[in-house]
Image (cartoon, helix red, strand yellow):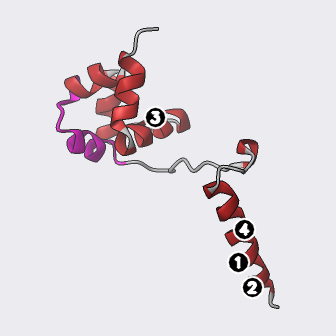
């Protein structure tokens, strides 16, 4: 069997293990995008800059800098913005739940 075939079989087995919930979470690799379109994320939520910042605990000044390309969000902010984009309900629940 070719190396490619062996790698494909190994990947399929790993995917099955993850899907079954049997994988060790410490081995997961996460992906944080190098670039992120902050304005598009905000637009998909249908919020003004101020509303977006209040809802998600961000600085309006930082948001404006990101949207206007003066600065880029750091990796932590990019990860947070990715979660806001993909699972806004989870973020809102986590931020509004009483401690």
Q: Which circle's residue, 4 or 2, is located before the other in the chain?
A: 2
The residue wearing badge 4 is 13
The residue wearing badge 3 is 80
Residue 66 point in image, percent of width and height: 35, 37
Work out how far the residue at label 3 is from the one at label 4, CA to CA, in angstroms: 30 Å
Q: Is residue 72 visible?
A: no
Q: State the SS at label 2.
A: helix
Q: Nearer the viewer, mark 1 or mark 3?
A: 1
Work out how far the residue at label 1 is from the one at label 3, CA to CA, in angstroms: 32 Å
85 lies left or right of 50:
right
Circle 4 packing at 10 Å, graded few (<14), some (14-19), many (20+), is: few
The residue wearing badge 1 is 8
Q: State the SS at label 3.
A: helix
- Of residues 16 and 74, which is closer to you in this image? 16
- Of residues 84 and 63, which is closer to you in this image? 84
Residue 6 point in image, percent of width and height: 79, 81
Cβ atoms under marks 2 and 3 closer than 8 Å: no
């Amino acid at each position: 069997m070719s190396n490619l075939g062996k790698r494909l079989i190994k990947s399929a087995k790993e995917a099955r293990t993850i899907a079954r919930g049997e994988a060790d979470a410490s081995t997961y690799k996460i992906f944080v995008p190098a670039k992120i379109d902050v304005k598009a994320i905000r637009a998909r939520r249908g919020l003004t800059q101020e509303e977006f910042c209040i809802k998600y605990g961000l600085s309006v000044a930082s948001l404006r800098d990101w949207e206007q390309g003066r600065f880029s969000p750091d990796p932590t902010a990019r990860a947070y913005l990715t979660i806001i984009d993909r699972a806004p309900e989870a973020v809102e629940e986590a931020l509004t739940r009483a401690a």
